[in-house]
Amino acid sequence: MPSSFYLDFMSTPEPPETETPPAGVIARLQQTIVRGPRRTYDSLRRKIKRLREKAARTAEAARAAINRARLYPSWMKLGSLNHYAPRPLKPEEFPQIRSWTGKATQPSIGIVTPSFRQAQYITATLDSVLDQQYPNLQYRIQDGGSTDGTVEILQRYAPRLTSWVSEKDGGQADAVTTGLALMNTDIMAWLNSDDLLMPGALNFIGQYFAQNPKVDAIYGHRVLIDEHGQEIGRWVLPAHRKNVLPWVDYVPQETLFWRRSLYEKVGGVNRSFQFALDWDLLLRFEKAGARIVRVPYYIGCFRIHSAQKTSSQISSVGQQEMDSIYMREHGRVPHYTEINRVADAVQYRASHATRMLMCGLRR
C-alpha cells in the first residue's frame, strides 16, 4: 500500500471526546492501528514473493516436460517409418553370397544376448541367430538370473551356444560388457532378448566386412514386429552422416555390428549407461575416427511390446542419460527445436531413401 494511506489514516479526525481514556491505552491503540496494516502488507508481500518463486519453478519444470514431450516423437519417428496392420514377416533379399571355402576365409562374428525375464521372446531371438548356421559364430547369453522359465530354455539350447550363464548382474550394460569381454572374434554385436536378426543377415555381414576392410562398423534398416512376431512396420534409414549423430540417436541397435579392434580402441561399453549405451558407444566410435556405413538392407527386427525398457524408461533414466550425452557433446542440453531440426532433416533424407528402395534402388 502507498505511504499516503498511512498519512491519510492517521490524519482522520478523532470523534468528539466523551470520556478520555488513559494515555497508555491510547498509545497502545494507536500502535495497533498503525502496525496492523503494515504487518498485513508485509505478510502479503512475502506470500506473493513465495508464490512467484513457486510459479517460476513450476514453469521451468513445465518447459522441461514440454521439451521432453516434443522431443520424444522425433526420437521415435527418425527415419522413414511406415506402419501397417500385422502381417507375416517378409525376409530380406540379401545379395548373392559367394561360397565360403572354409572358416579361415570368413570373419568370425561374436554376438551377446543380454536377458532378464524374457522367456516369452528369447526362443525366437535364439532361433533368429542360430538358424542362420553361420559357421564361424560365437553366441553367448548373459541372463540376469531370470526365474520365468528362461533358464530352462537356455538349457535346451546349450549344445548350440558357445556359452550361457544365469546370475545376478548390474543390468544390461554390465551383461553386454561381460559377454563381449569373452569374445575373441573379428566382428562383434549384441542382440537384445526380444529382438531378431533377419534370416541371412550374418552371411551378408560377414561378407561385407571381408570385402570392405576399411569399414569399421555397419548398421542397416529395421523391421518393426509385434508381440507375436508379426511385421507391423518398416523403418528406413538414410546414408550415414557423421555430423548428425551428436544430435540424435537414430541408429537401430539390433542392426549394428563393428570390428573388435575398434571396440577395444574406445574401451568398450560404458557400464554406467542402462538406456543410451549404444548411442554413447557410437559417438566414441566416431571420435576414434571410425568409418561407419549404413548398408541398404533390413538387418534386424525391433519388437514393440508393453514391457520393453525402451518405452518404460525413456522419460526417466533414458532422459537423464541423453541429457548427460548432450552436455558432453555440446556443453549444454539443446532446445528441442534444435534437435527436431536435425531430426527433420534425417526424416527427409530417409523418405528419399524409401522412395528409391520402392523403385528397387538400394543406395
Image: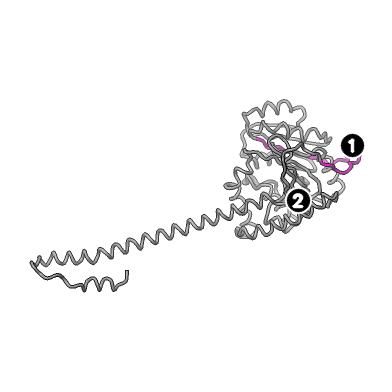
How would you rate the neighbour count of disc 2 (Cα within 10 Å): few for under 14, some for 14-19, many for 20 or more? Answer: many
Image coordinates of residue 232 in percent, x first then y, are 72, 41
- Position of the N terminus, as image quadrant, is bottom left
The numbered dot on residue 356 is none
Mark 2: which amino acid?
A: Leu
Q: Residue at x 82, y 41 (%)?
A: 92
Image coordinates of residue 238 in percent, x first then y, are 77, 53
Q: Quadrant of residue 334?
A: bottom right
Q: Are marks 2 and 1 in contact (CB under 8 Å)?
A: no
Vertical order, 83 against 21 (above or below): above
Counting residues from the start of the chain, the first of labels 2 and 1 encountered is: 1
Residue position marked by numbered label 1 in the rendering: 102
Residue nearest the viewer, comparing 172 with 231: 231
Vertical order, 77 against 157 (above or below): below
Report whether residue 130 is seen. yes
Magenta residues span: 92-115
Residue position marked by numbered label 2 in the rendering: 237
334 in the magenta segment: no
Report the side of 344 relative to 95 (left or right): left
Q: Quadrant of residue 120?
A: top right
How would you rate the neighbour count of disc 1 (Cα within 10 Å): few for under 14, some for 14-19, many for 20 or more? Answer: few
Vertical order, 243 against 259 (above or below): below
Q: Real-space Cα distance between discs 2 and 1? A: 33 Å
Secondary structure category for the residue under label 2: loop
Secondary structure category for the residue under label 1: loop
Report the side of 198 relative to 100 (left or right): left
Mark 1: which amino acid?
A: Gly
Q: Nearer the viewer, mark 2 or mark 1?
A: 2
Report whether residue 179 is seen. no
